[in-house]
Image: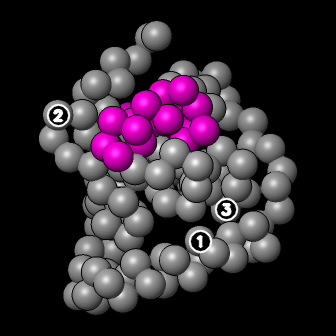
């Protein structure tokens, strides 16, 4: 593998979800500092991440952000950290920290529950540079 994923922030996502794939594409297009790599939760790499932490390996309704040997975040905390790491205008999302995490996660859960209805399931075709940022799909 060309990229050393251990020095990156890894976004784990539902590879079968149109909304999730939209957000992966959104991050890819804004990752100017090349900080992120991606793996689907259904992949062998994703399944190992989940099982190593005692997380559910069958339900894929949560986004995770993992920085090896430092932390992993889920749901709204992961999204807020991703936007903070993207920098620039996206740092304004830090205002979301004003809202208590349980409310942010409640909103996240509502979107997650309805995500298959919110976006079509079309395939996203990354550029070769973007494709190199995927550990496994």
Lateral position of residue 125 relative to residue 12, left or right: right
Query: Is disc 3 placed on a helix, strand or loop?
Result: helix
Vertical side of 136 occupied by 19: above or below:
below
How dense is the environment of label 3, judged by Cα within 10 Å: few (below 14), some, or many (20 and up)? many
The image shows residue 97 at horizontal and vertical percentages of 24, 80
Residue under pointer 3: 19
- Quadrant placement of the C terminus: top right
Q: To which quarter of the image does residue 79 belong? A: bottom left
Label 3, label 2: how many angstroms apart (C-alpha)?
29 Å
Name the residue that disc number 2 marks.
69
Would you name the residue on which mark 1 appears? 112
116 left or right, relative to 32: right
Residues in magenta, as a range:
29-54
- Figure check: 133 above or below 29: above
Which callout, 3 or 1, points to the residue nearer the camera? 1
Q: Is residue 117 left or right of residue 70?
A: right
Which residue is farthest top?
Answer: 1
Q: Earlier in the sequence, mark 1 or mark 2?
A: 2
Looking at the image, what colour scheme do you see? one colour
- x and y percent of residue 115 in the render? 68, 70
**Residue 8 x, y percent position in the rendering:** 31, 32
Mark 2: few/some/many CA within 10 Å (<14, 14-19, 20+): few
State the CA–CA distance, disc 1 to disc 2. Answer: 28 Å
């Amino acid at each position: 593998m060309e990229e050393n994923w251990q020095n990156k922030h890894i976004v784990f996502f539902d590879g079968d979800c149109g909304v999730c794939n939209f957000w992966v594409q959104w991050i890819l297009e804004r990752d100017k500092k090349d900080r992120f790599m991606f793996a689907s939760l259904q992949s062998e790499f994703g399944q190992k991440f989940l099982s190593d932490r005692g997380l559910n390996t069958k339900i894929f309704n949560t986004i995770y952000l993992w920085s090896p040997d430092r932390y992993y975040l889920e749901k709204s905390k992961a999204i807020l950290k991703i936007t903070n790491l993207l920098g620039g205008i996206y740092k304004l999302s830090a205002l979301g920290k004003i809202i208590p995490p349980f409310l942010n996660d409640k909103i996240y859960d509502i979107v997650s529950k309805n995500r298959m209805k919110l976006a079509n399931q079309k395939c996203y075709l990354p550029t070769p540079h973007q494709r190199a940022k995927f550990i496994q799909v």
